[in-house]
Every structure is written in C-alpha cells, then in structure tokens.
Image (spheres, grey):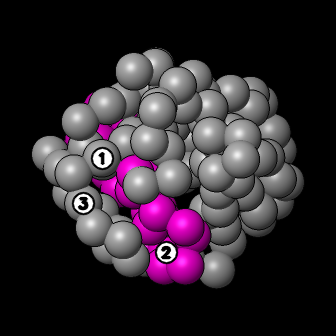
Amino acid sequence: VQLQASGGGPVQAGGSLRLACTASLLSFSSTAMGWFRQAPGKDREFVAGISWWGRNTAYAGSVKGRFTISRDNNKNTVYLQMNSLKSEDTAIYYCAADDNTVSGAVSRAAERFEYWGQGTLVTVSS
C-alpha cells in the first residue's frame, strides 16, 4: 500500500492550494481517508476526513469553512482544497487511510489510520 501526496508548496496568506493523495489500494472505495498536518514543534493534528463515498466529511475547527476534502474513487485519489490560507496553516500535510471502518464513517483519530503518505510541505507567508 502506498499513498503519494502532492500539491504542497509556498503560498501567500489568503491564497489557495489543492493537495492530492493517490493511493495504490485495491479497495480504495471502501476506505475512509483523512488529512493530518504537523507544524514545526507541534504535535500532529487532524485536519479533515471523508467516508467511503464522500457522503460524510469532518473538519478540524481551525479549517472549517476554508478547507474542503473530496475524493474521486475512479482515480483512487483524495483531495484537500485549501482556501484563505493563513500563516498558521504552515505544516507538513499527510494523507492517511483507514481501511477498517464501515460505510459512512469518518475517522478522526490518527491511531485508526493504518497507512500514511510521505507528507507534502505547505508554507504560508504573511
């Protein structure tokens, strides 16, 4: 199982980025996906999660209304659209997969996710 994240980079405050994570999973359409981030000197935190078919989503309070998670099961890819970026969004962003859940469930706890991507760095300058 491999998760390949992309789309990070430098951006000015107020700008937008879209992250993508492509998974080499045989059962991607029955896998809950999530995005986490870790800023320098801080713990890893949940950002957003999405259920099998994208019907249900969840967000951290700090990004709600600015970030949107989505998925394309035909492409085995999950996205994170990030708008109105702030300097405090600077972090390494990781995608993760939880293939031990049920349809409709959104996973938030990092320990639920069995598979992790390598991370992509987002740097927001003010």
N-term mark: 3 or 2: 2
Q: Closer to the camera: disc 2 or disc 1?
A: 1
Is there CB contact under 8 Å for labels 2 and 1?
no
Image side of residue 73 versus residue 27, left or right: right
Amino acid type indicated by mark 3: Thr
Amino acid type indicated by mark 1: Asp
Magenta segment boundaries in residue numbering: 31-60
The crowd level at tag 1 (other Cα within 10 Å; few <14, some 14-19, many 20+) is some
Is there CB contact under 8 Å for labels 3 and 1?
yes
Asked if residue 43 lies in the magenta stretch, the reply is yes
Identify the element where label 1 is drawn.
loop
Q: CA distance from mark 3 to mark 2?
A: 14 Å
**The one of 61 and 57 positioned closer to us in this rendering:** 57
Residue at which label 2 appears = 57
Against 39, residue 13 (above or below) is below
Image side of residue 16 versus residue 95, left or right: right
For this orientation, the residue located farthest to the front is: 26
Image side of residue 29 versus residue 116, left or right: right
Quick check: can you spot residue 124? no
Quick check: can you spot residue 84? yes
Residue at which label 3 appears = 101
Against 26, residue 16 (above or below) is below
Numbered mark located on residue 99 in the image: 1
Residue 120: percent from left, percent from top: 58, 26
Amino acid type indicated by mark 2: Thr
Q: Closer to the camera: disc 3 or disc 2?
A: 3
Residue 82: percent from left, percent from top: 71, 57
